Image (cartoon, rainbow, N blue to C red):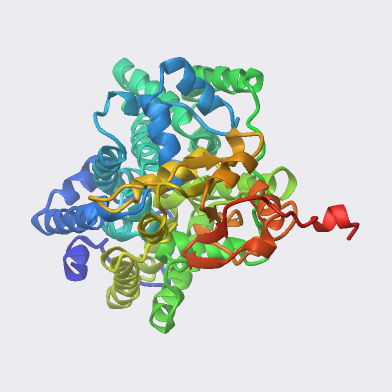
Amino acid sequence: MTNAIHQTTDSARPLGERSERAPDERRSMRESLAALASPWSLVVIAVSIAVGALLRGWNLDGLDQRAGEVLTEERARAPLGTAIESIAMPRNQAPLYFLMLRVVPGGVLEFRLANVVLGVIAIALVFVAIAIVLRSPTIALWSGALFAVSPMAVLLSRIARPYPLLLVLGLAAVIAFFVLLRGHRTRVLWVAFTVLSALAFLTHYSALALILAQAVAIAFRRPLDRAFARAWAISQAVAAVPVVAWAVYTLTAPRESGVGTDVPGPELLTLPRTIGNLALGTAIEWTWWVVPGTVAAAVGLAAGAVWAARRRSSSSEFLLTILLATFLPLITVALLVTPKYSDRYIAIALPALLAILAAGWIRTRLAPVATAGLALVLVTATAVIGVAVLDEDEPRTEWSGAAGVVVEEAGPNDLVVFQRWTTREAFLDAVPEGSELAAPTVVLDEVSGTEDAERAADRVFVVYRNPIEDFHTGGYRAFDPFTPGLAQMSDWLIERRERIEGEDEFVGIRVFQIPGGDIATEPTRAEAGD
């Protein structure tokens, strides 16, 4: 694949010759896209799409359901009014993805399959988008190949969440914008650009970063086209109306009650760790063999950022701005408003990051060196996500292990306790095929007390999902389930701590066993005056 990519390499110039504005000066969009249709390029694109589709679609049915996917399915199948209220309640989610799933038959597995299809479409769009934005088929081929195996992109396409749709709509809007910016302007294309932008904004609020990035691209365009700038401003104002209306509506919707989660906020190494996750998935697998690829990715990103900043063109500044316009607001909000910082919230910027990484190596003008550096990144990313997918070692909650133990041991006279209905549904979905949970269940959020149910039960099984989510890595941090105030379940457990007879631990879950009967309570530290 690496040799094939350099069949379309930009014509070389001496390293000392000033060529910061290349490849824009050397190729038109039409010529760049035509280069992608060469036999070697088509082989690279076909192999990338095939590998990307395999990684995204591998053993989807074998993944434990995430609590977030339970909520996705509920929104897709509930009456429309109930679904809209559920989406609006957190006040930080856009509605389009969940509403579109209402036309997809089936459940979570079918939703995941739909995301696999969207993920594969996104791979194809990355090739086209980078070829149009930078007019460099070489950078486009490397960017598309890296995106196909990007652990972040693969994992987001394997769960029923809105990010693959966001990438498809965002990439399509970027393609339309740059075609318009470079003079190919028709009424149909303006309408398509406006509609795509509106749909992207309604999929995820992070897509609004495209507005700032496009404004910077227009400002760096020489000569400045004021007529185009006015038309673009009107288009984006129209596109923003639906999402602004939705945001206003969410402010009037009932507020979601707190669930008692403890979320670590950004730290000093948050930004470099995020970049590592986006480029190589280093949060999934960090062992000695990812170090060379990590160094190669860091070198490419540093060189690419310098190249883009020095080039001062509409295309390179667009790529830099989309990164800054997603990273900085997220970190600011995480520090000042809510600590729920997650790498996936920056998914819209992933193609730009990979393009800058590829450009950094390619602008060395030394094809063998560029090939070696980018191949190292490509192989490392493929190995990281390959190990995660094939070994079923993706960051997740190990519902299947917890369900297997409880289903085997709990009888009809026992009781199983959960904190939220989403965790109960994820647990029930993981019950081994051919088995069923014989014991009744109770959800703490839905009852005023459990004492009567406990007295009637022989044993009580408590399924406690770790509330300390690490939104940065997509996993969990160690937690003490008996920390007062950590979650409603913690306070409930503290009252029964002395009676706990058994405990099993799984990824993201603790299962406790308590005898039924009368409850002898133990005061919490707060009640004891600690």
Task: Point out residue 154 in the picture as x, y percentages from the top left corner.
Answer: 33, 54
320 shown above or below 376: above
Furthest-left residue in this view: 39
Q: Position of residue 300 (x, y in %)?
A: 43, 68
Task: Give the vertical position of 461 relative to 238 (above or below).
Answer: below
Q: Residue at x 42, y 39 (%)?
A: 70
**Residue 421 image position (x, y, % from top left):** 50, 38
Q: Residue at x 88, y 61 (%)?
A: 530
**Residue under the point 37% across and 46% down:** 438
In the image, 244: left or right of 292? right
Q: Quadrant of residue 478?
A: bottom right
Image quadrant assignment for residue 145:
bottom left
Q: Residue furthest right?
A: 529
Q: Is residue 87 visible?
A: yes
- Quadrant (top left, top right, bottom left, bottom right) of the N terminus: bottom left
- Give the number of callouts: 0
206 sits left or right of 153 in the view: right
Give the residue furthest to the bottom.
288
Residue 272 picture quarter: bottom right
Front one among 277 and 440:
440
Q: Is residue 208 left or right of residue 134?
A: right
Which percent across, then down, holds residue 342?
Answer: 55, 51
Above or below 164: residue 23: below
Query: Can see residue 181?
Result: no
245 or 265: which is nearer to us? 265
Observer-nearest of 190 and 395: 395
Between 374 and 221, the one nearer to me in the picture: 374
